[in-house]
Amino acid sequence: MHISLPWVLLGDFNEMISNDEKLGELLVNRTCISTFRNCMDNCGLMDLGFHGPRFTWTNKSPCWQTTIKERLDRGLGNAEWATLFPSMEIHHLPRVKSNHFPILLSTDPREWKPPKPFRFEQIWLTDPTFPTLVDDSWKASKQIPSTSSSLSKFPWHLDALIEHIQSWNKNHFGNLFQCKTRLLARLCGIQVALARNPSPFLYSLENQLTQEYNTVLHQEYLF
């Protein structure tokens, strides 16, 4: 079966296409490899590659000597799809709780993202300086001519308040998002290293970083 239209498949296929896609315990079943590869060939599909950790599934064994890792999740596409999206990338993202690594398909990694609109965050209410900030910002808007009506002043008050809140939020809670980014980057690096050369130290470090990341996620949940 060959489809002439561009198409792509992404997810957990529960199969591997080579022996080097498994780490630990028994080797990959050659019959399963052959069957999966024949299916790909018959459908005109090819593996689209990846960036990040080598494997996408783990048995989450508490002992590193009995850990099994496999690449079960992948992206498959035909030549027409690859031609339509020549800059596409597939990323294996850091694993936190699931035994599968999330995978992300980006058709254009350079795609422009619009700025996020302003929104009220619940976590601001946990900071005792926030009410004072709002009160001071509202009072500071007296630069508007006194001849203006109360209704016409409101947008000016609101714009000034938003500007002050955004600056305050960056100074008070900006480190939270930076910390999350750093932890994810470190977790990804550790998981890449674990795929190449497992060791007790790396497994211990992965568990430590995972706990720290979950703590940050709990704080972020308030946003």
Image (spheres, rainbow, N blue to C red):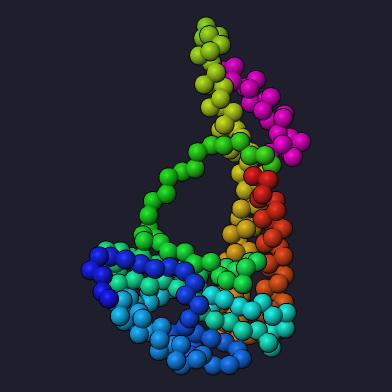
Q: Is residue 130 magenta?
A: yes
Q: Residue furthest left?
A: 4
| Front position in the image: 114 or 85 | 85
| Front position in the image: 216 or 81 | 81
Q: How many marks?
A: 0
With 19 as the anchor, is 39 left or right in this view? Answer: left
Which image quarter holds the N terminus?
bottom left
Q: Where residue 133 sits: x, y (%)?
A: 68, 30
| Front position in the image: 103 or 14 | 14
Residue 109 falls in image quadrant? bottom left
Q: Is residue 30 magenta?
A: no
Q: Where residue 192 sits: x, y (%)?
A: 56, 77
| Front position in the image: 48 or 28 | 28
Most frequent secondary structure within the magenta stretch: helix
Q: Where residue 83 sits: x, y (%)?
A: 26, 68
Look at the image and give the residue range highlighted in magenta.
124-144
Image point 40% across, 86% down: which residue? 35
Q: Residue furthest top?
A: 147
With 7 as the anchor, is 106 left or right in this view? Answer: right
Q: Residue furthest right?
A: 128
With 201 as the anchor, is 158 left or right in this view? Answer: left
Image point 49% across, 67% down: which residue? 103
As drawn, 204 above or below 177 = below
Q: Answer whether residue 145 is visible to the viewer in this image.
A: no
Image point 64% across, 79% down: which residue? 59
Residue 160 falls in image quadrant? top right
Q: Answer whether residue 47 is visible to the viewer in this image.
A: yes
Image point 73% across, 79% down: which residue? 62
Q: Where residue 132 sits: x, y (%)?
A: 72, 29
As drawn, 184 above or below 198 = above
Which image quarter holds the C terminus?
top right
